Each structure stands twice: as structure tokens, then as C-alpha cells.
Amino acid sequence: MTLPADTFIWKLGKNIVPFFFQKKYGITHEGQVPEPPFVLIANHVSYWDPFFLACPIKYPTAWVTARAHFENSLLAPLIKATGAIPKRKARPDVETIKGIFNVLRQGGVVGLFPEGSISWTGQTGDHFPGTDKLLDRVDVPILAVRIKGAWLKKPRWADRKRKGQVNLELKTFEDSKALDFIDYSEWEWQREEKNIFPGRGRAEGITRVLWFCSECGTFGKFKIEENDAVCSDCGRKWHVDEYGFINGQDGVRLYNEQLEFLQKYLEENNPIQVLNAVGEMKNTREKGKRNKFAGDITLTEKTFTVGEKEFPVNKIRGQATFMKKGLEFSFGDFWVQLKIPYASLLLSTSLEILKKEN
């Protein structure tokens, strides 16, 4: 039987991809894979997750993928060729649900990451609203997979990867209890396993999640010295060790600490400023080319400005980070995507705080 997603691209890579990732990442797995049809869910910890999962799961899988990837000139051809199902972030999408059930009715496999995006902290984030109801309705096995070690090999914020193995733990469920299985913390696992993830430049990229000096309160003034981030004002250091911990603390604690500083900073009506952003806007009701623009970003209590374009904060919807260097949101009938190498999480989090205040 030919399954959905059993495309030329999948046939071409079905042996090459698992062999390459098995050899490069030393992937191990435990647990059994059911016969199709089934739904595959996993925690989302790296860009390579679908390829890691292809090692033990030999069936072609139709992945539910962010619609923004279908609009990317480089990614779109490959994604479409693999039979992926588009999903708009941060909003209900009836067409996505139809696509999922269509694949399952044909005896195929549907893969999805209930978080929607890769974890910034190493801990499973919130699931898309309605995911539990979907899993209770599908009436097929649900294969849940915990991906362990992949986040610490290259944290989402990091510029360089580290050495270390990836382990996959598989378990089959009948309903939404599968979500509890993938509610996972890389840090709890690491405290127990104490695996080493060595590598050079382990602090490179950490300013994507490190915004304030906890010693002197300075915003955005850090220099990177191999495995350390150093405050330019007071000299306080953040050391990333070979276990992945930052000054002995995990990524969740670091983010929560930074969030407290950010909330106070915004409460005092300080602006967030980012240099040299580029972006594009597309009317979601019309077909045609996108409008490109560029400029410095200034985010205040009321407005989000990029160059000469101004967006009222209270009219921005569905803001989310895209990959690690992008920010996207909807504004009326427009979908806006910005390329911001080191400030996407900072701006997304700031928008969330300001919208609540407004």
C-alpha cells in the first residue's frame, strides 16, 4: 500500500537519512513502533527532530508544519515534496484538522510537535489549545516519543553544537495521556544522568536568552569569551559548563530570572531597541509578492516600530519566534515576518508582557 507522504523525496532519503543521523548523532532508542495508521507526537528540542525520529520510525510521515515554512522560498519546495500539512501558528486552523484526518483515513502516519516550536529553555512548553481534544478523537494509536539529549547538544539559543548522544524513548497510547509522556525536562534528565556535552564556544549565542546582568542590572551589554558571557559594566560572568548548566543553574531558571528583570524594565517604560532588522509583509487575503522593509526596531508601551513602519502593540496578534532568528505576527490582514539574529525571543516576550498590560 502506498501511504500519504510516500513521495519521491521520502523514497530517496529513507535509507540515507537514518544512516547519516544514526552515525553522526549515535542515536539510541527504546520502545516499539505500531503499524500505521497512527499519530506521532514528540517534544520539540531541535531543528533535526524529524530526522532523529526517522531512525526508529521507518514509515513515511506527514508532518504538521508551520505555514510560514511553506512561504519560505528555500524551504517550501522540500516541505511540499514531503507531503507536509500546513499549520498557522497561534490560531485555529480547520484545514490542518482536515489534512490530519485525511492522512489517517488513508492509513498513513501524521507527525506533530504539540508545542509548535522548539523549546528555548530545555523544558516542554505549552501545547497548542485543542491538541488534547484532537488526540482523543483520532481513534488510532498515538506514538509518543521523548527526545533526550538533543537540546543539550545544541540549545536553541546556541551558535555551536556540542558532542553527545541522543536517546529516543517510545511509548504508545490510546488518547491524550500521551501528552503527559512528552512533558519532559532536559534538566531533570541531566541531573540524573550527568552526561557530558563538550564543545568549544559554548556561550556563543547566549545573549538570545541572557538580556540583563543580574549583578548590576545593565541591559544588553555582554561580551562572549569562548564558554563565558561577561557583563561589560561590572565583569559578572556566566559560565556554560560541559553539562550544559549556566553558573550551575538550568535554562528554565535563567529564563525566569531574565523575565523578572524584563518585566520591571518595561514597567518603567524603558524602550527595547534593536538595530538593523529586515522584514516583509504579506496580505493573507491576496496573492502576490511580499512588501519588504528594513530599519531599526523600537518597542515601547504603545508602538512597535521598524524603520518607517509602525504597528500599534494592541493590534498585534499571534506573535511567535520563527526558527531562532525570526519574529512573526499578524497585523490586521497582514502577516509580518522579521529577521532579528539575536533578539527574537526578547521581542516576542516583551510584546506578550506589553499586550497584557494594555
Image (cartoon, rainbow, N blue to C red):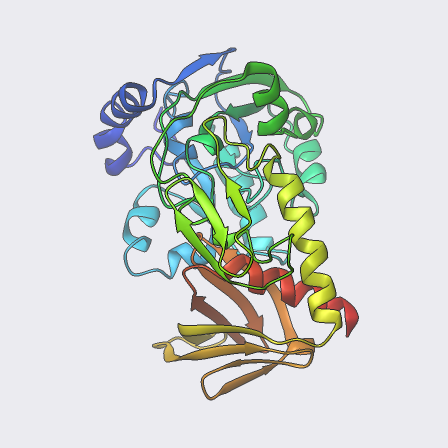
| Left or right position of 279 against 212 | left
Placement of 1 over or under 283, stated as above or below: above
Please count the marks in the image: 0
Q: Position of residue 78 (x, y in %)?
A: 29, 47
Q: Position of residue 185 (x, y in %)?
A: 62, 29
Q: Residue at x 61, y 57 (%)?
A: 90
Q: Position of residue 355 (x, y in %)?
A: 72, 70
Question: Which quadrant holds residue 58?
Answer: top left
Name the quadrant of the N terminus: top left
Q: Nearer the viewer, residue 175 or 290?
A: 290
Q: Residue furthest bottom?
A: 308
Placement of 352 over or under 102, stated as above or below: below
Question: Which quadrant holds residue 115?
Answer: top right
Q: Is residue 157 visible?
A: no
Name the quadrant of the C terminus: bottom right
| Left or right position of 183 against 237 | right
Q: Residue at x 39, y 56 (%)?
A: 70
Q: Residue at x 70, y 70 (%)?
A: 266
| Left or right position of 142 against 306 | right
Q: Residue furthest right?
A: 357
Q: Residue furthest front?
A: 234
Question: Which quadrant holds residue 82?
Answer: top left
